[in-house]
Amino acid sequence: MVMPTAQVILPPMLRERTNQQARLDVEGTTIRDIIENMEHQFPGLRFHLCYETGELRSYVNIFIDQANIRYLQGLDTPVTAGVRIRVIPSVAGG
């Protein structure tokens, strides 16, 4: 079975974990698979995206095209071939 490949676009703060790569081509059928496969490529990256429980950190937003996965199926949101996934940290201010 051929796995869909998605393009993951990372924020500057995570690029130090990916040898300064801003975009990664990653296989997976769900966002959870994508994160797992990024972890295999770049050990330690998952820690910056997910809690030890496996759930997405509250300050991390992941978008498929224009949709935040929190309003879809969370980490179990399906991924189709060629989709763009953006990892965007929350911005707090005051």
Image (cartoon, grey):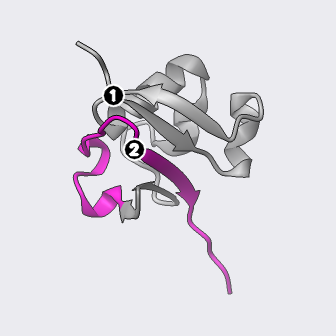
Q: Disc 2 to disc 1, how far (Cα)?
A: 9 Å
32 on left or right of 26 = left
Instruction: Judge whether residue 78 is colored magenta.
Output: yes
Dot 1 amino acid type? Pro
Judging depth in this view, the residue of 82 and 32 nearest the camera is 82
The residue range painted magenta reads 68-94
| Number of residues whose C-alpha sits closer than 10 Å to that of mark 1, classed few (under 14), some (14–19) or many (20 or more) | some
Please tell me which residue is depicted at 29% across the width and 38% down the height of the picture: 80
Mark 2 or mark 1: which comes first in sequence? 1
Residue at the outermost front position: 82
Name the residue beneath numbered marker 1.
Answer: 4
Instruction: Judge whether residue 75 is colored magenta.
Output: yes
Q: Are marks 2 and 1 in contact (CB under 8 Å)?
A: yes
Please tell me which residue is depicted at 32% across the width and 60% down the height of the picture: 70
* Residue 1 position by quadrant: top left
Q: Secondary structure under badge 2? A: loop
Residue 44 placed where, x, y %?
60, 27
| Number of residues whose C-alpha sits closer than 10 Å to that of mark 2, classed few (under 14), some (14–19) or many (20 or more) | some
Judging depth in this view, the residue of 4 and 38 nearest the camera is 4
Dot 2 amino acid type? Val
Q: Secondary structure under badge 1? A: loop
Q: Quadrant of the C terminus?
A: bottom right
3 on left or right of 61 = left
Give the answer, above or below, for where 10 lies relative to 42: below
Give the answer, above or below, for where 9 lies relative to 89: above
Please tell me which residue is depicted at 70% across the width and 32% down the height of the picture: 17
Name the residue beneath numbered marker 2.
Answer: 83
Residue 27 placed where, x, y %?
40, 25
56 on left or right of 19 = left
Residue 23 placed where, x, y %?
62, 39
